[in-house]
Amino acid sequence: MTDPLWHGPAVALLNLFTADGSVDAPATAALAARVVGAGIRGVLVNGSTGEASALSDDERVALVAAVRASCPDVPVIAGASGEWAGQAVARVEAAVKAGADGVLVAPPRLGGDLDRYFEAVAAAAGDVPVLAYHYPPVAGGPVSVSALATLPVSGIKDSSGDPVRLGHELDLGGVVYTGSSALLGYAGWLGATGAIVAAANLVPEECLAAWDRDAAAQRAVLTAERTAKAQPGGYKTAVAARFGTSATRRIG
């Protein structure tokens, strides 16, 4: 594993669509710039929060390029998972060409040889860091802690919300980002590198404070997440209500 691109909270960005379901790259880039302006330290584009599985490869590239242009001062990470190595390699190469500072890659849902898969991904990424993504079954297959120790990756985003697993990952001494809003303060306290969370679309300031172990802010993040997920559309609807963005979804 290598040095981190950033420390602290980053946003797992919502991708925004027009009323007819078309990708709205300028609006998505504006949302990214809004949360970065609030202090968020990095942007993940085309992750599971961004409905990546419903995007074409051309749409993925357009979104990465737009966010890269709108957020020049923070790292931009691109989701680039695939159901086989060739698909992931193509997406990684396209993301790097579009300006991504790093890529986030989950294993195929049906498993396989993780070493060969991530070796191909790392070769395609070149000098650009690769983060493994553990969030089964939402985003691909699992990345076991034992496998993580030897994979050719720069670190991991773990969205499982499992505090025991988080501790095991930190024992490896590498770059670890939690994807769980519930673990923001705990992860910061334990010494995790940072976080990549959907809640930062809605309450970025509270996410930053929670990371710094502000208990009231952590409760506010949990309340925002619970309230958002209790309504149809989840964070997409909640962010639309707060910031006037589109609530159109392709998934759900």
Image (spheres, rainbow, N blue to C red):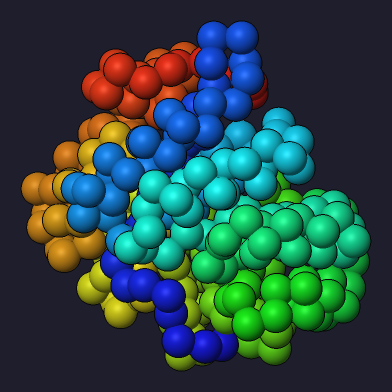
In terms of image quadrants, where is residue 186? bottom left
Q: Position of residue 175 (x, y in %)?
A: 47, 80
Foreground residue among 203 and 183: 203
- Residue lying at the far front in this picture: please name it: 69
In terms of image quadrants, where is residue 153? bottom right
Foreground residue among 220 and 12: 12
Query: Against 87, is 57 above or below?
Result: above
In the displayed structure image, the side of residue 118 where residue 226 appears, left or right: left
Identity of the residue drawn at 35% across and 68% down: 194
Q: Position of residue 108 (x, y in %)?
A: 81, 57
Query: Against 58, is 84 above or below?
Result: below
Q: Position of residue 104 (x, y in %)?
A: 61, 62
Count of numbered tags = 0
Q: Is residue 133 visible?
A: no
Identity of the residue drawn at 67% across and 62% down: 97
Q: Can residue 95 be seen in this view?
A: yes
Identity of the residue drawn at 55% across and 38% down: 50
For the C terminus, the quadrant is: top right
In the displayed structure image, the side of residue 101 where residue 39 appears, left or right: left
- Residue lying at the far top in this picture: please name it: 20
Query: Against 187, is 108 above or below?
Result: above
Identity of the residue drawn at 11% across and 57% down: 214
For the N terminus, the quadrant is: bottom right
In terms of image quadrants, where is residue 164? bottom left
Q: Position of residue 21 (x, y in %)?
A: 62, 16
